[in-house]
């Protein structure tokens, strides 16, 4: 996955591309409207990327105290912008890491 446009194009499929890391797959499932599957993938990545996505998902769910815990685990401040902006920023960041 090389950029946001390619990531969005992959959403036409039935499943995320097989080579996506768990945190990006979580964002893929979230974009497809499957919060529970997205959450399962976020839990698979116990590092900072998974924690950042986990935080976003709990913020989206409305569980702000749980979201704050996951932002802290990710070493990030609590997001304050729109959910869409946070989702896009996470995709940019995580897709960029995959390119290295």
Image (tube, rainbow, N blue to C red):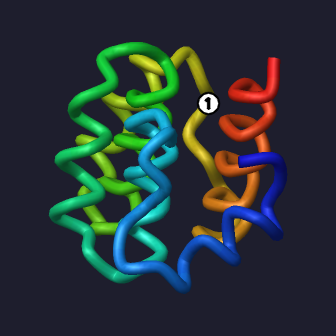
Q: Is residue 2 left or right of residue 64?
A: right
> Which quadrant of the figure has residue 10?
bottom right
| Frontmost residue, 77 versus 23 | 23
* Residue at the limit of the structure toward the front, as seen here: 18
Q: Is residue 12 left or right of residue 94?
A: left
In x, y percent, where is residue 45?
A: 33, 24
Element type where label 1 sits in the image: loop
Q: Residue at x 30, y 67 (%)?
A: 62
Q: Residue at x 41, y 14 (%)?
A: 47
| Rendered position, 4 above or below 25 | below
Quadrant in which the C terminus is drawn: top right
Q: Is residue 63 left or right of residue 4?
A: left
In x, y percent, where is residue 41?
A: 27, 44
In x, y percent, where is residue 36?
A: 16, 64
| Rendered position, 94 above or below 61 | above
| Frontmost residue, 80 versus 86 | 86
Counting the numbered discs, the total is: 1
Q: Residue at x 24, y 41 (%)?
A: 66
Q: Residues within 10 Å of mark 1 (few under 14, many from 20)?
A: few
Q: Residue at x 44, y 38 (%)?
A: 23
Q: Is residue 54 left or right of residue 93?
A: left
Report which residue position mark 1 lands on: 77
| Rendered position, 33 above or below 69 | below
């Amino acid at each position: 996955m090389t950029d946001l446009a390619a990531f969005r194009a992959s959403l036409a499929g039935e499943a995320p591309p097989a080579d996506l890391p768990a945190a990006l797959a979580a964002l893929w499932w979230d974009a497809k409207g499957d919060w529970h599957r997205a959450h399962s993938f976020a839990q698979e990545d116990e590092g900072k990327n998974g924690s950042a996505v986990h935080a976003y998902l709990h913020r989206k769910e409305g569980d702000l105290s749980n979201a704050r815990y996951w932002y802290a685990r990710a070493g990030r401040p609590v997001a304050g912008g729109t959910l869409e902006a946070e989702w896009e920023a996470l995709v940019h960041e995580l897709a960029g890491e995959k390119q290295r």
